Amino acid sequence: MIKQKTSIVILDANGDSNQKIQIPTIILKNWKIILGVSLFFICMICAVVVFVATKTQSDRYEQELTKKMEALEKAKQSLAVEEASNQLNLVQVQKSFESIDSTLNQINAKMRKRGLKDVAPKLKNAGGPIETEENLDELSKYYENRLKSIDKKLEGLPLGIPHHGKITSRFGYRRNPFTNRGLEMHSGIDIKGSIGEPIKATAAGKIVHAGYKGQYGKVVIIEHSNGWETRYAHLSTTKVKVGQKIDAGQVIGTLGNTGRSTGPHLHYELLSYGKKLNPEKTMLF
């Protein structure tokens, strides 16, 4: 089968034949279809190129976005851990200060039981910003231990008032209360009261005597720490036993008029390593 061809003459500007080419006749007859198919394939190729380029760029953006999201998530987790750590430290510091407050409240309560003022009274008409402090938890622990040490020392130190009443006879030389003649050494202080009123220990310690003892009448003697000793004489009754450990402010007996006494009162003595001292120096009336 001989393919048919069609000659195409190319003319110049003057109309003269310059060149002649031959094209298969089938192409001329179907040029529209061929042109359409060619345009279709060109468009398809362009679309593929655009798709591939867009997909590549999209993948790159997606990868970058994923990395940023992962970095953001790590930062968020780190921030959450830091916040939790800060919250934990805050809770620890708060517990330390609450412990300090609790210890102070215990000390103040014991001071009040002895008839003394608080060692750390509440501040009135005060305020201001809270200053930051490094190692705040360590500082809190330091003060907490100091307060506990103070509390322990105060427990065994005779302070305060064994009975609320008027002092009728002070420490030192005085006239004989029975004859009103001559001088005698009064080794304690006398506090007036009514029979049956409670008498309280001025410090924690151990009972070494509870009962009748010569001119003291019914007396309670307590040994405290660091060589301190207190005596509570002329009682009507005793509320403790020998060997018993008692706390500061605990009732140990009731006021009376036993022994060498001219009327109901408490005779209170304070000794340090056996030497009698003036109890008023440890009392605030």
Image: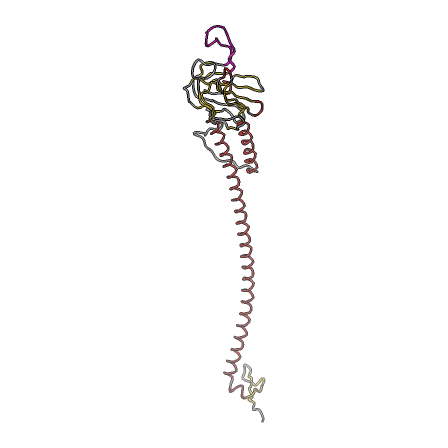
Residue 168 percent location from the top left of the image: 44, 14
| Quarter of the rendering containing residue 7 | bottom right
Quarter of the image with the N terminus in it: bottom right
Q: What residue lies at 51% left-to-right and 85% top-to-bottom?
A: 30
Looking at the rendered image, the quarter that the C terminus falls into is top left
The tally of labels here is 0
The relative height of residue 245 versus residue 272 in the rendered view (above or below) is below
* Residue 212 shows in this picture: yes
Which residue occupies the foreground of this view, 247 or 40? 247
Q: Is residue 55 above or below residue 196?
A: below
Q: Is residue 267 magenta?
A: no
| Magenta highlight range | 171-187
Q: Quadrant of residue 166?
A: top left
Q: Is residue 54 above or below residue 247?
A: below
Name which residue lies at 55% across and 38% down: 137
- Is 184 magenta? The answer is yes
Picture coordinates of residue 273 (x, y %)? 58, 20
